[in-house]
Image (cartoon, helix red, strand yellow):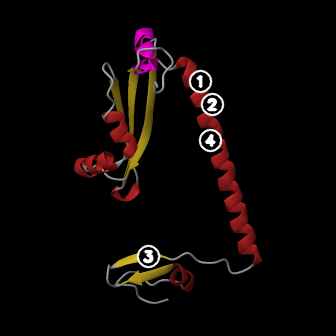
Amino acid sequence: GGDVGGDKQLTSEEERLVHWDESMRIRIFKPVPPKDAAEIKQHEAAVAEQRKRWRYYYKMESELFKYQKFKFPVRNNHSFSGFPVHFSTTDFNEIRSYLFEAKRFVKIMELPIEGAAYAVACKVYPLSGGVVSVWIFLGVMVPWKSKAERQQLMKRPNGKPGGGKGK
């Protein structure tokens, strides 16, 4: 193996996986095609396992959604909607900048509805190497329209019920 920027000696296998980028002074891990049928079979098994795990995740997410539909504490005559966002930084300005560029966040914040109640939940998980995993959930609970408001919205411009444009 060769010396990579003053680091330890790399084995030939590590050299096959790592490319030293002098301009950025970082290691870049290259995707390596499998060498033989055994590696291809191992790769296919890993892909199949990941797909199985994602199917399980989506099934559990669906079950949780069904459960929350009946058990989530939402006021009567209100709807709750929200979404999670993931960051690998705790820099407030970076997070804020991203959020104000996200269409879902802007839609929630600009709702023209009186009585909307906003919810924010945040969890920070420490990972190795000083990296963090930051999960933020943003949600809003909005009141349903009253019968009078719904009827007003359904009126035609000429005052007759039915919605749409009058002639």
Q: Earlier in the sequence, mark 4 or mark 3?
A: 3
> Horizontal placement of 132 versus 38: left or right?
left
| 3D distance between C-alphas at marks 4 and 1 | 14 Å
Q: Position of residue 67 (x, y in %)?
A: 59, 24
Image depth: mark 3 or mark 2 in front? 2
> Horizontal placement of 75 versus 60: left or right?
left
User: Residue at the spot x=65%, y=48% of the render?
Assistant: 53
Image depth: mark 1 or mark 3 in front? 1
Q: Earlier in the sequence, mark 4 or mark 1?
A: 4
Whether the magenta-drawn stretch holds residue 54 is answered as: no
User: Residue at the spot x=63%, y=48% of the render?
Assistant: 54
Q: Earlier in the sequence, mark 3 or mark 2?
A: 3
Q: Are marks 2 and 1 in contact (CB under 8 Å)?
A: yes
User: Circle 4: is it few (<14), some (14-19), or many (20+) Cα within 10 Å?
Assistant: few
Whether the magenta-drawn stretch holds residue 148 is answered as: yes
Q: Is residue 49 above or below residue 39?
A: above
Residue hosting label 4: 58
Q: Earlier in the sequence, mark 2 or mark 4?
A: 4
Q: Amino acid at mark 3?
A: Ile
* Residue ranking furthest to the front: 167
Residue 125's disc is: none
Residue 28's disc is: 3
Residue 63's disc is: 2
Residue hosting label 1: 67
Q: Are marks 2 and 4 in contact (CB under 8 Å)?
A: no
Q: Identify the magenta region.
A: 143-157
Q: Is residue 127 above or below residue 45?
A: above
User: Residue at the spot x=65%, y=38% of the render?
Assistant: 59
